[in-house]
Amino acid sequence: MQRFGFALVLFGLTLVLSVVGMLLTDGLTPGRVAPGFAAIAAGAGGVLLVIGLHMLERGRPHASRFGPHTFSG
């Protein structure tokens, strides 16, 4: 589960960064990227990041309910 979550985080981060990079270079040649497509792609990348981070957190072997500093003694 952690490998798939890590892959989702990497893909989501790559998607968001590529959209940002494309929009930054769009200033040189305007009209190359539709704003609606950029918004949808950035939103999808954010969703992938959140799902991937959730899967990474669920895959921890001793994930406590109240955080990493809770004593289970």
Image (spheres, rainbow, N blue to C red):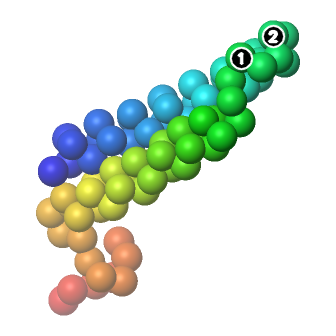
| Residue located farthest toward the bottom when viewing the structure as drawn | 73
Disc 1 marks which residue?
32
- Could you tell me the amino acid type at mark 1? Arg
Residue 21 horizontal/vertical position (percent): 67, 22
Height in image: 45 above or below 21? below
Image quarter of residue 17: top right
Say whether residue 27 is left or right of residue 20: right
For label 1, the SS is loop
Residue 9 horizontal/vertical position (percent): 38, 42
Label total for image? 2
- Could you tell me the amino acid type at mark 2? Thr
* Residue 40 numbered mark, or none: none
Which residue is pictured at 20% across the width and 41% down the height? Answer: 3
Residue 28 horizontal/vertical position (percent): 84, 10
Which residue is pictured at 29% across the width and 36% down the height? Answer: 7
Q: Say if residue 20 shows up in the picture.
A: no
Residue 58 horizontal/vertical position (percent): 23, 64
For label 2, the SS is loop
Height in image: 62 above or below 42? below
Say whether residue 57 is left or right of residue 41: left
Which residue is pictured at 18% across the width and 69% down the height? Answer: 62
Disc 2 marks which residue?
29
As measured in the structure, the alpha-carbon distance from the residue carrying label 1 to the one carrying label 2 is 6 Å
Q: Say if residue 68 shows up in the picture.
A: yes
Give 17 or 62, whichever is nearer the viewer. Answer: 17
Image quarter of residue 64: bottom left
Which residue is pictured at 35% across the width and 71% down the height? Answer: 68
Q: Residues within 10 Å of mark 1 (few under 14, many from 20)?
A: few
> Given contact means CB atoms under 8 Å apart, are the residues at marks 1 and 2 in contact?
yes
Give 36 or 49, whichever is nearer the viewer. Answer: 36
Q: Residues within 10 Å of mark 2 (few under 14, many from 20)?
A: few
